[in-house]
Image (cartoon, rainbow, N blue to C red):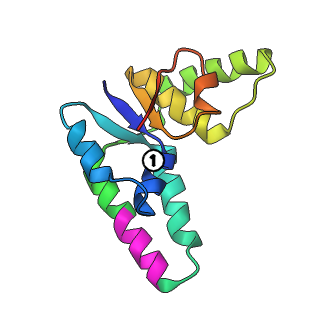
Amino acid sequence: MAAIVDSSILIAAERGRLALDALLAEHSEEPIAIAAITASELLHGVHRATKPTQRSRREAFVEHLLAELPVVPFDLVIARIHASLWAQLAAKGVSIGAHDLLIGASAIALGYDVATHDRRSFPKIPGLKVVQW
């Protein structure tokens, strides 16, 4: 199944705790992408690096990902889904992180799953299929 990959997967790969190339090869017949907010989260990590070697390594990793994986832009279709999900969750008194809700809305708009290590936020989003990589 097609998937939007969450930053939890990508950060684990950058830290050497996950073989991302093997996972992507395993899912090579399926569309795989990241949401625009995920690109921002990863780039934020580059800017937050405290050591030049760490920053250089992170930047190379992130730029490689951005060259390899399509980035799904936040558009009006996703904005409408996001607003609806946000209202539904708020009506139930359920709160999740703003970035996770944007990622979930992006996945729903495309009919994709979300591949993540996050077992708290994403399962709360109605209509979203969550897969653990």
Q: Is residue 25 left or right of residue 78?
A: left
Residue lying furthest front: 17
The residue lying toward the viewer, choosing from 99 and 114, is 114
The part of the image, by quadrant, that contains residue 63 is bottom left
Which residue is labeled 1 in the image? 9
Q: How far across and down, in percent of the image, does residue 20 sit?
A: 32, 51
Residue 15 sits in quarter? bottom left
Q: Amino acid at mark 1?
A: Ile
> Mark 1 packing: few (<14 Cα in 10 Å), some, or many (20+)?
some
61 versus 41 height, above or below:
below
**Residue 49: image x %, image y %?**
55, 74
On screen, residue 66 above or below 49: above
Residue 45 within the segment the image draws in magenta: no
Identity of the residue drawn at 18% across and 32% down: 29
- Which element type, helix, strand or loop, lies under badge 1? helix
In the image as oriented, which residue stretches furthest toward the bottom?
Answer: 52
53 horizontally vs 63: left or right: right
Which of these two is toward me, 131 or 127?
131
Q: Nearer the viewer, residue 63 or 24?
A: 24
Q: Is residue 101 left or right of residue 43?
A: right
Magenta-tinted stretch? 53-61
